Amino acid sequence: MQAKDSLKEFDAEHHTNLIYVVSDGIETCDGDPVAVAKSLADSNAQPIINTIGFNVDSEAQAQLKEMAKISGGIFSTVNDQSDLEPEFERAQAVLDAWEEWKNDVLFDLENIGINSSFDVMSDSNEWSYKIRNQYLKLSNLFFMAKKKIL
């Protein structure tokens, strides 16, 4: 529920939101984690919820799998601290790869914008040349016609 409040300003149209839930068992606080995951998935932030079961039984695994499934996330299970560390390293690797991809795309978009600006400038210069050339031709024609009339 706190994640929903934290992510409310990060809409899915402009952000990729990611939540990791590490649990050591079935929910015991009289809440419904699957309903909360559904509420998050249906929110403006639409986060991907990855769940990690830390030495959990089959009932807790089913609950965590459903939470991940609802939001397009993944479920994994670990038995101890040494299993948990690679999960976070993998998550960091995914985030690093996404950040690199995002930066590459932004660089490409910037280049497209620069090239488009040059194209517009070139077309503008060409039209300005044509307009100026036409103006000079009409001015000369007017000057010649005026000279013949006088």
Image (spheres, grey):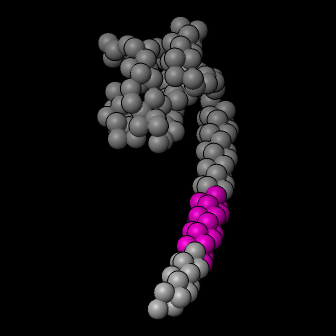
Q: Residue at x 34, y 36 (%)?
A: 8
Q: Residue at x 43, y 17 (%)?
A: 38
The x, y position of residue 30, in whole percent, is 32, 12
Vertical arrangement, residue 141 with respect to residue 10, above or below: below
Q: Residue at x 51, y 91 (%)?
A: 147
Q: Quadrant of residue 123?
A: bottom right
Q: Residue at x 48, y 87 (%)?
A: 149
Vertical arrangement, residue 12 with respect to residue 95, above or below: above
Residue 121 makes an appearance in the image: no
The x, y position of residue 150, in whole percent, is 46, 92
Say if the magenta span includes residue 64. Answer: no
7 or 30: which is nearer to us?
Answer: 7
The x, y position of residue 19, in whole percent, is 49, 33
Say if the magenta span includes residue 129. Answer: yes
Residue 26 makes an appearance in the image: yes
42 or 20: which is nearer to us?
Answer: 42
Q: Residue furthest front?
A: 149
Q: State which region is magenta.
A: 110-133
Q: Is residue 130 left or right of residue 3?
A: right
